Image: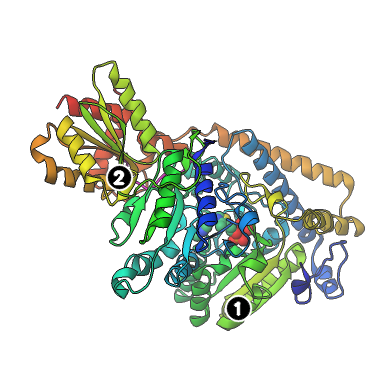
Amino acid sequence: MFNQWESEWVQYITPEGEITPTGEKVWDEKSTEEKLRFYRWMTFIRLFDRKMVVLQRQGRIGTYAPLEGQEAAQVGSALALKQEDWVFPSYRDHGVAMIVGMPLTQIILYWAGRVEGCKPPEGVRIMPPAVPIATQIPHAVGAAWGSKLRKENSVAVAYFGDGATSEGDFHEACNFAGVFQLPAILFCQNNGYAISVPFTRQSASKTVAQKASAYNFPGICVDGNDVLAVFEVMKQAVERARQGEGPTLIEAVTYRKGAHTTADDATRYRPFDEVEEWINKRDPLIRYITLLKNEGLLTEQEERDWEENAKQKIEQAVKEAEAIPPKPSTHLFAHVYAKLPPALEKQKEELLKKEGTYHA
Amino acid sequence: MPRLTMVQAIRDALCVALRTDPHVLVLGEDVGKNGGVFRATEGLWEEFGDNRVIDTPLSEAGIVGTSIGLAVSGFKPVAEIQFLSFIYPGFEQVVAHCARLRTRTQSAFPNSLVIRAPYGGGIRAPELHCDSTESLFVHIPGLKVVTPSTPSDAKGLLLAAIQDPDPVIYLEPMKLYRSVKEEVPEGWYEVPIGEAKKVREGEDVTLIAWGAMVPIAVQAADAWIKEGVTCDIIDLRSLYPLDEETIVESVKKTGRVIIVHEAPKTAGLGAEIAAFIQEEAFLYLEAPVARVTGYDVPVPMFALEDAFRPDIHRISRAIHQVISY
Ligand SMILES: Cc1ncc(C[n+]2csc(CCOP(=O)(O)OP(=O)(O)O)c2C)c(N)n1
């Protein structure tokens, strides 16, 4: 199922953890610190993701969308962004969110069904996860437009899945981005499935990337489990955008190792062999760790230390999130309008009365 | 008779329809191999094949739009929208075409199609999955809108919807998908669209509800029996057309009415029903028609959903209010 991509994609690190001939120069130019940063984030995000699945099983958060397997796509792309750039994520992009500055506690609150978790800290330009598929893509294009009109240097990124490319919103956003030559990056994590529906049922196109040609901007296919290639492709797209050269569609070919959400059973629709192949042979983290170790940049001890450190931070964040007092019922009315209309004030009072309930 | 949950009864209805009528098609996101995210189409793809139980691309405009084309060409599509909250890309197709196709073609072509969609809260679902937007559809002339509150009504209403010559929006309260099992008749039977159901006979107050609010209305009413107050409880089942007769008859008997819905208050279906009641039974009213509804705020994420959804306490307060008016 990978042939159509492998003939075209950018790949710098093979699934076996070897640098490809085209990747050598890119790899050599990276500092050790940069190389380790990829590893640290990918590991951190995987551990966070696994913790969230456990929290869901324990009933401490609600339904959760795991991202395991997509770490390289998220880390590589998000690390190519700057503080002033805009991010419009989907519900599976917690890795991206963390990297651009969304506190873990917020992400945990969000999945615990608490609206407070949607709010980014001051200065972090990320929107809450978009739940209706593809709807965030035009927003990113709009934010890119704003940046262009204001002659700012920032770019805007929309994160979405392969399924999203079937919605009108995706195509309409591409069209605007192309027509107005906007500094937007449309970043598709093609994980092969939209819930149960394989990409072959999503589109008769060979790739997502090729769709960009209809809108007359570059569409680039990259091995989404190769963090180095994703980073480079994203960096180039960001540079193009900053220089006023317009949008790019990036297709990062990846795989979600787990179910669509904690409410889904992926064994119903994915062949066992395929899943095994992705988990055992194509994992983004394993290949990168192999590479680092072969290069003498990471020892077993350092690996254990980093995992330990990450786990502690995650546990701490869970503790903090769970200690944040729940909002009162009247919070329903907070932030609905800048100023609450009188009719809503009345409803709010009515809700308060309910607290002193009348029992028959 | 087999004992089924609502979601099993819906599946059974689809199965019976697919077996009985070769023109029936089931299409939507994840309805095929996966059997639907709520398992409402479980096993149908295996039994009826890829040409009759169809996994579509992720596109509500595509699903509704092609269903219209299929209907015009003589098929009876039963389209699933995975959650009602995600129908909006297809809303234009519903409003601008589906609802008025009969008028615009002067009945030249068939237009028999069903759009099924889970809706409503109470199951700790993720953000934005839980809206109750039935009134958006009730407001559109040309559509019929139904919603069951029991497994056997679910099956009979769905078969009636499939049999109906006009487009029907069939809303499935997620909260009730698996909450009870009951005996559901086998084979084809229909619950007529446009007929409400009396869930309880009472003398003092009329409670009007639908979908997931019905069992809550029943609980609230039961709590008042020991106080000597009995409620006539109407499960509308059909939101358009309304069973005007059943409503008026009950109001004339009790003179006191409470409408319960999960959707926000403003321009909710309760407003329409209240207006209708004062038109038809004004002189019988002993108290203003009361509404117990969701608040006029975006349906909250699940941490606050219990505060948003009408509960027995709010209904109880309303009962107290109308009887002591
Ligand atoms: C407009 C809309 N339709 C349907 C859904 C239900 N739904 C949630 S996720 C999903 C699949 C999305 O697949 P994809 O875009 O490939 O992203 P992935 O989940 O694989 O990351 C569907 C159909 C939705 N959220 N929004």
| Cα–Cα span, label 2 and label 1 | 52 Å
Q: Residue at x 30, y 62 (%)?
A: B142
Q: Position of residue B100 (x, y in %)?
A: 31, 68
Q: Is residue A70 visible?
A: yes
Q: Position of residue A275 (x, y in %)?
A: 77, 55
The answer to whether residue B151 is left or right of residue A256 is left
Q: Secondary structure at mark 2?
A: loop
- Contact, CB < 8 Å: mark 2 with mark 1? no
Q: Is residue B296 magenta?
A: yes
**Foreground: B31 or A240?**
B31
Q: Chain of mark 1?
A: A
Label 2: how many Cα within 10 Å (few below 14, some 14–19, many 20+): some
Q: Secondary structure at mark 1?
A: helix
Residue at the spot of label 2: B195
Look at the image and give the residue range highlighted in magenta.
B294-302
Q: Is mark 2 within 8 Å of ligand 1?
A: no
The answer to whether residue B256 is left or right of residue A12 is left
**Foreground: A171 or B35?**
B35
